[in-house]
């Protein structure tokens, strides 16, 4: 559930920022010795990790950085955190930052967990007295227990990140930078981290999150920024950003519909959503009827044909699907030209949120289907008596 943040002044300004890295092609010591002094530049290649990025992030917002591997998400986060400097452009920040950019970054392997807590807290600007006051809370949050006095080189990856996250969230940061670390640790600890980030949002702090989990981004962020090849290709509302990410991962331009397959005898042209009066609708109330109209085009006369639909959340989780076969419906013969089929949901029992509708049509069910992904989108409004994708009447006794 997205909680409206108290929007404040700018805390991050990124102005025309580009970051280049030099990648060596002669990786072995032997190759470097052989090539030393001889056309050294021929064995180096400049790689642009971030390309001409302009962004402004307001205080009190939660922003998700999305994109495929190698798109520049982590580099951009390091630029914001001051870990690396831009090759050109300017990064301006204000307030105390706590950064969780790499697993165990800033931890000294030969120091104990206790010593690393004080070391990291000091790096993040906390005094020893402040750390003393919060030490017990940090250890309890991390769940490290008796291992707090063990050298961290003996920690598992989960223990590393739990202690690092515990220190970061107890340093009273204005801006929290998080890079994929929530993917480590057990489910209970991940939930604890999510709850702490949600609390930070309610307190008006700023969170900038890199994650490959669309579900995490959808739950935590109200703004999504999608990167590809180091450049920002989308910046806007989170669910739209997740849709843009899908376009990128499937090799389409953002907002571009999949190409039609002219070889298929019947194709799906578009998906239309209608209310109980037959009027187009994009907002649906929980419990109201909803009709999904699939507009099709037959390229030849067909004695039989079949169709179906599915409804997904922005994260790709299917919440409802059906087709003419499951509904024991035989479609009448269709002649060359346009037609449609309606699937009517008598009571849309969806929870509040945004949903995508996919459709498919074929000569024989599930064989050589023509599919239209995200052909329509609707938003469900409810009284939010419960959370999740299912709306249900709940009473307490």
Image (cartoon, rainbow, N blue to C red):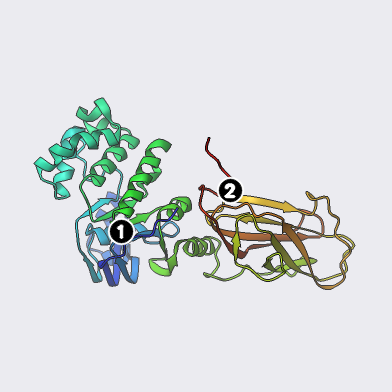
- Please tell me whether mark 2 or mark 1 is closer to you in this view: 2
Which residue extends farthest front?
Answer: 397
Label 2: which secondary element: loop
Query: Would you say residue 27 is visible in this rendering?
Result: no
Label 2 and label 1: CA atoms lie apart by: 36 Å
Side of 285 relative to 150 (left or right):
right
Residue 283 quadrant: bottom right
Side of 245 relative to 49 (left or right):
right
Residue 113 is situated, as x and y percent measured from the top left of the image, at: 21, 34
Residue 208 quadrant: bottom left
Side of 313 relative to 63 (left or right):
right
Side of 83 relative to 296 (left or right):
left
Residue 139 quadrant: top left
Check disc 1 and report the residue beneath it.
Answer: 77
Residue 27 is situated, as x and y percent measured from the top left of the image, at: 32, 53
Query: What label does residue 150 carry, if any?
Result: none
Check disc 2 and report the residue beneath it.
Answer: 390
Q: Residue at x 27, y 38 (%)?
A: 163
Query: Would you say residue 86 is visible in this rendering?
Result: yes
Residue 285 is situated, as x and y percent measured from the top left of the image, at: 60, 59
Of residues 40 and 63, the one drawn nearer to the viewer in this rendering: 63
How crowded pointer 2 is (Cα within 10 Å; few <14, some 14-19, many 20+) is rated as few
């Amino acid at each position: 559930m997205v909680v409206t943040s108290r929007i404040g002044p700018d805390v991050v300004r990124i102005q025309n920022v580009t970051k280049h890295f030099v990648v060596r092609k002669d990786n072995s010591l032997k190759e470097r010795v052989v090539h030393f002094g001889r056309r050294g530049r021929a064995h180096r290649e400049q790689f642009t990790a971030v390309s001409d990025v302009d962004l402004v992030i307001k205080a009190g917002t939660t922003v998700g950085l999305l994109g495929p591997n190698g798109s520049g998400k982590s580099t951009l986060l390091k630029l914001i955190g001051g870990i690396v400097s831009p090759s050109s452009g300017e990064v301006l920040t204000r307030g105390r930052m706590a950064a969780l950019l790499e697993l165990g970054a800033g931890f000294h392997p030969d120091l104990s967990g206790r010593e690393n807590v004080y070391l990291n807290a000091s790096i993040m600007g906390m005094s020893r007295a402040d750390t003393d006051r919060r030490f017990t809370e940090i250890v309890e949050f991390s769940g490290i227990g008796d291992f707090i006095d063990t050298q961290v080189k003996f920690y598992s990856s989960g223990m590393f990140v739990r202690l690092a996250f515990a220190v970061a969230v107890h340093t009273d940061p204005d801006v929290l930078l998080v890079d994929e670390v929530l993917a480590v640790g057990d489910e209970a600890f991940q939930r604890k981290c999510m709850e702490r980030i949600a609390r930070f949002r309610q307190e008006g702090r700023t969170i900038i999150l890199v994650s490959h989990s669309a579900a995490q981004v959808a739950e935590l962020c109200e703004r999504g920024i999608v990167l590809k090849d180091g450049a920002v290709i989308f910046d806007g509302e989170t669910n739209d950003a997740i849709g843009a990410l899908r376009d990128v991962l499937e090799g389409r331009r953002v907002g571009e519909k999949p190409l039609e397959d002219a070889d298929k005898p019947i194709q799906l042209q578009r998906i239309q959503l209608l209310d109980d009066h037959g009027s187009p609708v994009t907002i649906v109330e929980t419990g109201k009827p909803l009709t999904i109209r699939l507009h099709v085009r037959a390229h030849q006369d067909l004695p039989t044909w079949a169709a179906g639909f599915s409804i997904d959340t922005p994260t790709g989780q299917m919440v409802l699907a059906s087709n003419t076969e499951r509904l024991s419906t035989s479609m009448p013969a269709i002649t060359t030209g346009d037609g449609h089929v309606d699937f009517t949901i008598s009571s849309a029992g969806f929870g509040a949120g945004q949903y995508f509708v996919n459709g498919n049509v074929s000569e024989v069910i599930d064989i050589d289907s023509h599919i239209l992904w995200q052909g329509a989108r609707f938003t469900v409004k409810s009284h939010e008596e419960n959370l999740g994708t299912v709306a249900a009447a709940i009473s307490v006794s």
